[in-house]
Amino acid sequence: MEFITALFSALLRASRGLQLSSFAEGDNVSESDFEKLLLEAVDEGLASLGESSRQAIYFHMEKSFNVKKQEIPRKTEAFAVAVEKIFGVGANFLEALILKSLSKKAGLKDYQIALEGLTFAGEVANIKRAMER
């Protein structure tokens, strides 16, 4: 229980200090640009748990779930499964933090994250589609 409490506290602190978006609404974004934004958002989300924790999570994902850091944009479902297995109920808060960061980086100021009924991978796809408009 202490771990979950510490996780929630770290996520709340991190959500207050997210970086500003990298793209403005309407900018033309390539596939590689989107992958870079997603990796940055994931990195920031995991860094909210501390640098050594972030590195340990990437290592664990690669060894236990066969998801390398640079593959996350192409394996969003596998990434989400790994996060959910590692963090249990805390995964939703980490996923929401990542999605919030991604939408801001994408220049989507008014984007509403609806984790109810949608998967993490589905939300990532929605953000990508919204960027392409």
Image: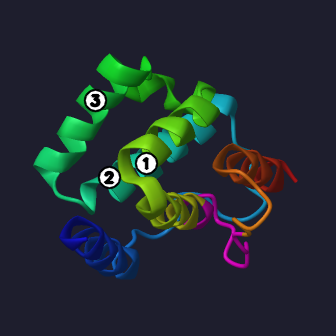
Left or right: 115 in relation to 94: right
- Element on which disc 3 rests: helix
The residue carrying mark 3 is 60
- Element on which disc 1 rests: helix
> In the rendered view of the protein, which quadrant contains the C terminus?
bottom right
Closer-to-camera residue (133/6): 6
**Residue 66, horizontal then vertical, whole percent:** 43, 17
Tell me the residue at 61%/40% (across/down). Answer: 34
Do the residues bearing badges 1 and 2 touch, measured as CB atoms within 8 Å? Answer: yes
- Element on which disc 2 rests: helix
* Badge 3 density bin: few <14, some 14–19, many ≥20, Cα 10 Å: some
Q: Quadrant of residue 44?
A: bottom left
- Kind of residue at badge 3: His
User: Which residue is most to the front?
Assistant: 1
Q: Is residue 4 above or below residue 44?
A: below
The residue carrying mark 2 is 46
- Kind of residue at badge 1: Val
**Residue 45, horizontal then vertical, whole percent:** 38, 57
State whether the magenta stretch is mostly helix, strand or loop.
loop
* Alpha carbon separation for disc pair 1 and 2: 6 Å
* Badge 1 density bin: few <14, some 14–19, many ≥20, Cα 10 Å: many
Nearer the camera: disc 3 or disc 1? 3
**Residue 23, horizontal then vertical, whole percent:** 60, 58
- Kind of residue at badge 2: Leu
**Residue 25, horizontal then vertical, whole percent:** 73, 65
If you read the primary sequence from the N terminus, does the residue marked by circle 3 or circle 1 appear first? Answer: 1
* Alpha carbon separation for disc pair 3 and 1: 15 Å
Q: Range of the magenta residues?
A: 103-113
The residue carrying mark 1 is 42
